[in-house]
Amino acid sequence: MSRNYYQLLHVAETADLQTIKKAFHQLSKVLHPDITVLPANEAANEFHQVCEAYEKLSDPISREKYDNKLKESRLGTDHYSNKINVRSNLSSNEVANDGNRRALSGGELLSLFLLGIAVCISLLLGIIFAVLDERDLYVAPSWLNPSPSLLDESLYANRNAASASS
């Protein structure tokens, strides 16, 4: 039997945001796949459903859309009101992309900043070591020019002559 988001969180449809938040935190402690006694697949599935329900019900705009869809589905099928399938009432795009994205947290921004710094330092070290090793910073790929040209031979001859004299 499929349950709606309110039934997943064990709250009334008239519950306020604090009640929903409290119910989510209690359920997430019980259902988290790392600490629960349930089988791993079942725990992960239940935890995912509870997270999806909380995400939908914690945002006032998406909650209002969900409540309207829930009411429409109840009016259309009165004798199935206890068996509302949340996934069939909402398309997967509406559940995943309702247009509202959360801002990046401080930790996520710090991680992105550190990743950018690491990439820049790696590139800089690569260039420094290439210059210190007297390598060319631009090398044409072998597949682009399969036969060496006279220009390439003269460049290598000049480079070999320069390295022999030093």
Image (cartoon, rainbow, N blue to C red):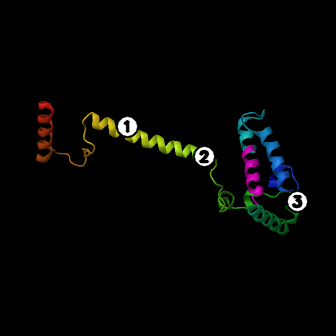
| Whole-number angstrom distance, CA of label 1 to CA of label 2 | 26 Å
Which sits earlier in the primary sequence, circle 1 or circle 2?
2
Residue 81 drawn at (x, y percent): 86, 61
Q: Amino acid at mark 2?
A: Glu
- Residue corresponding to mark 1: 125
Indicate the secondary structure of the residue bearing disc 1.
helix
Residue 36 drawn at (x, y percent): 77, 34
Rendered residue at 81%/50% (across/down): 21
Quarter of the image where the C terminus is located: top left
Residue 55 drawn at (x, y percent): 73, 53
Indicate the secondary structure of the residue bearing disc 3.
loop
User: As rendered, which of 135 and 5 lies closer to the eye?
Assistant: 135
Would you place residue 160 above or below residue 93 in this image?
Answer: above
Which sits earlier in the primary sequence, circle 3 or circle 2?
3
Decide whether residue 48 is among the magenta residues: yes
| Whole-number angstrom distance, CA of label 3 to CA of label 1 | 59 Å
- Contact check, label 3 and label 1, Cβ < 8 Å: no
Which sits earlier in the primary sequence, circle 3 or circle 1?
3
- Is 14 on the left-hand or right-hand side of 119? right
Neighbor class of circle 3 (other Cα within 10 Å; few <14, some 14-19, many 20+) is few
Indicate the secondary structure of the residue bearing disc 2.
helix
Neighbor class of circle 2 (other Cα within 10 Å; few <14, some 14-19, many 20+) is few
Q: Amino acid at mark 1?
A: Leu
- Residue corresponding to mark 2: 108
Please tell me whether mark 3 or mark 1 is closer to you in this view: 1
| Whole-number angstrom distance, CA of label 3 to CA of label 2 | 34 Å
Checking the image for residue 14, the label placed there is 3
- Is 151 on the left-hand or right-hand side of 27? left
Magenta region, residue range: 47-59
Rendered residue at 21%/48% (across/down): 145
Q: Amino acid at mark 3?
A: Thr
